[in-house]
Amino acid sequence: MRSLSKVKIKWSPEFAYALGLLATDGNLSIDGRHFDFTSKDMEQLENFMKCLDICVKIGYKTSGFTGKKLPHIQFGDVNFYKFLLDIGFMPKKSKIITSIKIPNKYFFDFLRGHFDGDGSFYSYWDPRWKSSYMFYTTFVSASKKHIEWLRNEIQKLLNIGGHIAKGGASSVYQLRYAKAESLKLLPRMYYNNKVICLFRKRLKIEKAFKIEDKKL
């Protein structure tokens, strides 16, 4: 077990997925070296470390929003920090992050990480229509420019538009895809049954696809 965490900078599905997680639940320190990654899901932390091939002690910190203690990891890597700055990350990124330079080959791995970090999937039977089963795939960001970038990239690759809305009284923006577009988008994100992901979210999607009688 290594005591010093160093990230190998090489594009792969796992590396791109980790960057998706970092874009949502990660934080770059202003010191030019350190990172913090926080998630309520222990599986998320383990997936993040596995994808970057690092081994870091999992600690706990108090959330400034809920006051609850959440598991998180911290580590330092100057070269990885510089790489992230070069592709579009920055400290205190939540409201100012825009585009991230992700190779098209790995974009949907990045998107799956983004979805596992801050996205959601929900389904329901619409009482207005007989046998009408609906579902939506949603991506969230406090940065309007970032959510617009996500939408543009997805549109270029899949020719689906989605819909951007402000999240009610909150300060976040939501990029939503209804059922017809989700049926095109999700199989690209979960292109085989071995891709690394947050299991509970994939399970929810698989159940919806079974009801819709489509195979994910």
Image: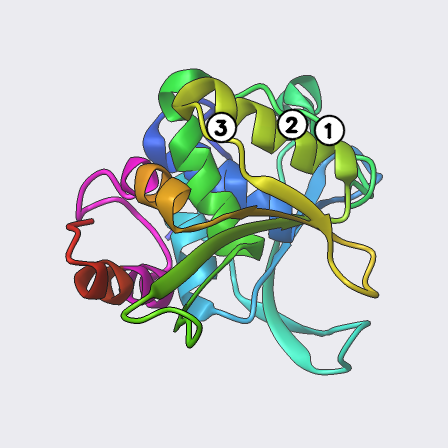
Q: Are marks 3 and 2 in contact (CB under 8 Å)?
A: no
Residue 18 is left or right of residue 92, and the answer is left
Indicate the amino acid at tag 3: Ile
Indicate the amino acid at tag 2: Trp
Which segment did they paint magenta?
Answer: 187-205
Indicate the amino acid at tag 1: Thr
Q: Are marks 2 and 1 in contact (CB under 8 Å)?
A: yes
15 above or below 117?
Answer: above
Residue drawn at x 44%, y 32% is: 16
**Badge number at residue 149:** 2
Which residue, given by chain and number where applicable, does mark 3 sit on?
A: 154
Q: Position of residue 144 (x, y in %)?
A: 77, 38
Which residue, given by chain and number where applicable, does mark 1 sit on?
A: 98
The part of the image, by quadrant, that contains residue 60 is bottom right
Front position in the image: 65 or 56: 65
Disc with the residue nearer the chain's start (2 vs 1): 1
106 above or below 69?
Answer: above
Residue drawn at x 42%, y 71% is: 126
62 above or below 98?
Answer: below
**Distance between the alpha carbons at the discs numbered 3 and 2:** 9 Å
Q: Is residue 197 magenta?
A: yes
Discs 3/1, front:
3
Q: Position of residue 134 (x, y in %)?
A: 39, 62
